[in-house]
Amino acid sequence: MTAAEAAVLFGAAVVGGGPNAVAGGGGFLSLLPPLVFTHVPPLRANAMRAVARCPAF
């Protein structure tokens, strides 16, 4: 993973965490596309997003 990819993922996590903390559901639109953009397979990206959001439920 390059530094640029890490920065994109970090930014997406921050942007997705805000709406998820306030109203829930902000992670789908802001976390899945950056993971796929950084060449993570879609099935693995969806699983990672689901596990990362578990503490928010």
Image: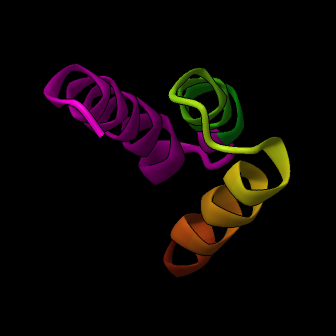
**Image coordinates for residue 42, horizontal then vertical, percent:** 80, 42
3 is within the stretch colored magenta: yes
Q: Left of 30 or right of it: where is 25?
A: right
Q: Does 34 appear above or below 50?
A: above
Q: Does 1 appear above or below 5?
A: below
Point out the stretch of residues depicted in magenta: 1-27
Q: Residue at x 54, y 26 (%)?
A: 34
10 is within the stretch colored magenta: yes
Q: Quadrant of residue 35?
A: top right
The N terminus: image quadrant: top left
Q: Does 14 appear above or below 34?
A: below
- Which one is in front, 38 or 23? 38
The C terminus: image quadrant: bottom right
Q: Residue at x 58, y 21 (%)?
A: 37
- Which one is in front, 55 or 35? 35
**Image coordinates for residue 6, horizontal then vertical, percent:** 25, 35
**Image coordinates for residue 43, horizontal then vertical, percent:** 84, 54
